[in-house]
Amino acid sequence: MTEEAPAIEDCQILHVYESATSVTEQSTQQSIKQGMEQSTEEGTTNQKLWKSVKQNPRLAICGISLAASALLYGYEVVFVGSIAALPAFKQHFGTPDGDDYIIPSVWLSLWAVSGPLGTAVGSLLGGWAQDRFGRRFTIGVASVWQATSITICFLSDEAPSIETRGGTYFAGKLAQGIGMGGILSAMQTYMSEILPTSLRGPILSLGAPLFLLGQFVGSLVIKAGVDLTARNSYRIPVAIQWVLSSIPFLVTILLPESPVWLMRKSKLEAAEAACRRLAGPQSTLLYNRLRDESVQRELENTANNDISYLDLFRRRPDFRRSAIIIFANLIPEFFGLPLLGHSSYLLEVIGMSAGKATTYFIGGVVASIITNFIAFWLMSRIGRRPMLILSMAAITVLWATVGIVGCFSSAGGSIYIGIGLILVITIAGLGAWPASYAIGGETSSLRLRAKSQGLGWFANSAGSAVFSAFLPYLYNSVAANLGGKAGFVFCVLSAIACLLSFLYVPEMKGLTPAEADDMFESGQSARKFEKHQLSIEVTEP
């Protein structure tokens, strides 16, 4: 009797496997046919962007609303480094230095890494919470946590001593980062699950320009308080974070739980109701599409309901996808975004006045915002792979010229370096940066998507923390003093990223989740994805 039970159980599992495999094969064979049937209202995979937006207005608005959380992220990133320059902030958090105040370097360093460190932790927690409690719940809790953490920062100047003020502010920024990580990972998971193929890449790419727009708003707010001495000069910028943190919280009130998550929890009626809220008259098409994408994974879900981060690396196809996601999230570090964020100080080090250096920085941000929004349209026309490879190749050349000019000290050289930095961020905004958001958001399988986004944002934040820690030593006059020659470092990194993109990053434009699964499972090379994409374009009416 004790030996028969396992045998019966094995037979049952085998029966489930055979049934699920049969469903998978039938679904894969019918994927093109189903896509053609649904193309009338949901749009073909490669149709024009604006036509797809018109056919899916509610889903487009939902996706853009979720992407708007990047405004808060951009504001926080520029906020941490800029607020320390405000006179009133230095007076309350620094020590006397003649007629001025100076903030201890230990606190500047700790505050600089607090955000990325917290975001890294929050991303991993968010990936776990999404699968256990849902995407909407995770965004909502993370938003409340984030808003509470802002209160800690707002009241940190009430602490009795400089040490406790600095420590309280650090704790608040660390906690904010944890909330931000949860928001970002869940936001990207939700978007990548519900958006149709024709909208998925472009709307995911909006994270880059909205991040920059948040930085731009933060720069203006901080600049407005430079000449003020009262505590409100830095308390008002802190309080504005409450306004921005309300964006993801309002999204959780207006949007339902992800239908994909509800289907995986066998809550089919709730999933239908969620589709009605998300798509209105087209809710049946949305429900059928999401159901068809999920049916092919019923065996995986039955065999392993509790997904861990180790599952991202157990199977070769999943390991490959996870590696691509990590690489995509590190693209900003490869093309030099951390150095571009310090461009004002770098230009001052090589001899440019503070006023001109700030002008170049703002000019680069504005130019990049414009090109990032242009990339929103290009994403649906050109694809992620060519945008990434071509822009990284151009950036490699630009960094090389910046490094060469940096070998010579002259007024004209500093101007060229300033222009070169603007061109780098502009070209990155036209290709590599928004493409990295799309690639990172759509490469994983649906089953592992929540954990994959947690891993991706962890890699992004960890990379940012590492670069933030060592970059000042490269160009600072009291350290390596490379100045403009730091361009050679990012020339090499950009070249490596360009080569890795060519060899390993596939073209996902126009691929449904089922088609992407088939390509990865069969072990197709990155270039063969593009050939498959061309075959889709040829067969479409």
Image (cartoon, rainbow, N blue to C red):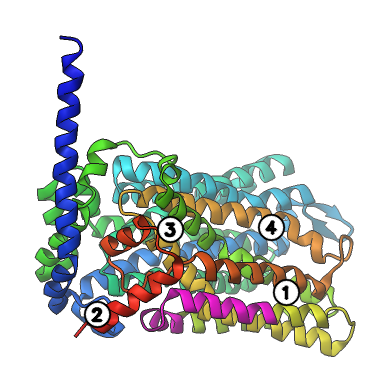
| Tag in front: 1 or 2 | 2
Q: Predominant secondary structure in magenta?
A: helix
- Compared to residue 435, the image places residue 26 above or below, namely above
Residue that numbered label 4 is attached to: 468
- The tag on residue 245 is 3
Picture quarter containing residue 422?
bottom right
The residue located at (21%, 75%) in the rendering is: 56
Label 2 sits on a secondary structure element that is helix
**Lower sequence index among marks 3 and 1:** 3
Where on the picture, by quarter, is residue 16? top left
Q: Position of residue 458 (x, y in %)?
A: 52, 50
**Disc 3 marks which amino acid?**
Ser
The answer to whether 144 appears left or right of 496 in the picture is: left
Amino acid at pointer 1: Ser
Q: Position of residue 41 (x, y in %)?
A: 14, 76
- The foreground one among 95 and 410 is 410
Out of 274 and 192, give the one closest to the viewer.
192
Q: Determine the secondary structure under disc 1.
A: helix
**What label does residue 344 carry, if any?**
1
- Per the rendering, the mark at residue 324 is none
Give the magenta part as a residue range: 373-397
Residues at marks 3 and 2, CA–CA distance in whole angstroms: 30 Å
Q: Are marks 2 and 4 in contact (CB under 8 Å)?
A: no
User: Is any part of residue 266 visible from this angle?
Assistant: no
Disc 4 + disc 1, Cβ < 8 Å: no
Mark closest to the chain's N terminus, 4 or 3: 3
- Label 2 crowd bin: few (<14), some (14–19), many (20+), radius 10 Å: many
Q: Is residue 273 above or below residue 492?
A: above
- Looking at the image, is mark 3 or mark 2 nearer the viewer? 2
Hey, what amino acid is under mark 2?
Answer: Ser
